[in-house]
Image: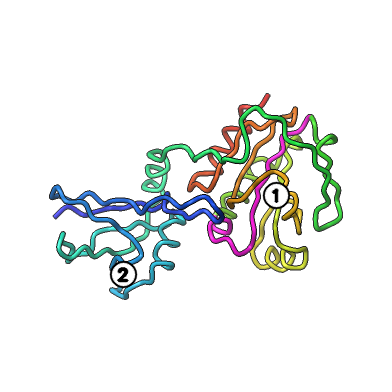
Amino acid sequence: MKQLILSLGLLLATCGVVAAQDAPLVKTAAPQRIRVDQNSVVTNAEGQRLPYQVWSTMVASGEFKLAGAPNYSPANPAFVVLPQTAEERAAQIARMPPPDESPFFKTGQAMAPFKVWDINGRKYDSKELLGKVVVLNFWFIGCPPCRREIPDLNRLVEQNAQRPDVVFLAVALDEKFAVQKFIKENPFAYAHIAGARALAQRYGVRAFPTNVVLDKEGKVVFHALSHPNIAGFMQKAIDNIK
């Protein structure tokens, strides 16, 4: 039997009113398809069965893949979580479709003005940010897909560390003390605007995470919901801004 490999990168749930994508179908050697969901039997390499929340988070991280277990059959669709190589991860990302655009913004629209302060007291005025690329992340601590993409967003900041014309702002629903506690334990390299529920509501953002890139005129050039390669598409958007 050929080994079955399943990527659950696009199984990432989106927190909010936008529904998560359906669980993917696994093509088998037979014409039958097996749907993998929270009721599927999934174990680690040692044979220990893993809860859905555990194995789906592992696979969604991009560091693991889901494969048919040694005793797999259409009648016994059992799976095992295995480490994924860098080459497999790169191939997985290359096969992925682009992220879904968010329903809250339109490409080319001018972002409504804002004036906010981060948790360190620094002011960010959209009028004063004209001439810079502004990257926004709408999120909250209790949102699993928001937390999962933080390492990729940190790498995005690092990739643009030598560009003073790129500004990264995380618009958090949580209050300042909660954000400070969270980022102390989970470094997040954006500047953080805490207690910003009203700001998110102002822009109509109701699903999280939502990522937005503004050009140097304050216009939306990229806006998307959760995606396993969100940082890669955001970097392309940044690089395309003149």
Q: From the image, which quarter does the C terminus lie in?
A: top right
Whole-percent x and y of residue 162?
A: 71, 39
Could you tell me which residue is drawn at 45 percent across and 62 percent down? 57
Query: Which colouring convention does the figure follow?
Result: rainbow
Please tell me which of labels 2 and 1 falls first in the chain.
2
Q: Which residue is mark 2?
A: 43
- The quarter of the picture where residue 36 lies is bottom left
Whole-percent x and y of residue 195?
A: 76, 59
Q: Label 1 is placed on what type of residue?
A: Gln
Taking depth in this image into account, of 113 and 216 the one nearest to the observer is 113
Q: Which residue is mark 1?
A: 201
- The quarter of the picture where residue 174 lies is bottom right
Nearer to us of marks 2 and 1 is: 1
Report the residue that reaches farthest toward the bottom. 48
Whole-percent x and y of residue 231?
A: 56, 43
Could you tell me which residue is drawn at 48 percent across and 55 percent down? 13
Say whether residue 30 is left or right of residue 160: left
Q: Give the residues in magenta.
A: 131-148
Say whether residue 210 is left or right of residue 91: right
Taking depth in this image into account, of 94 and 158 the one nearest to the observer is 94
Could you tell me which residue is drawn at 27 percent across and 63 percent down? 79
Distance Cα–Cα, label 2 vs label 1 = 41 Å
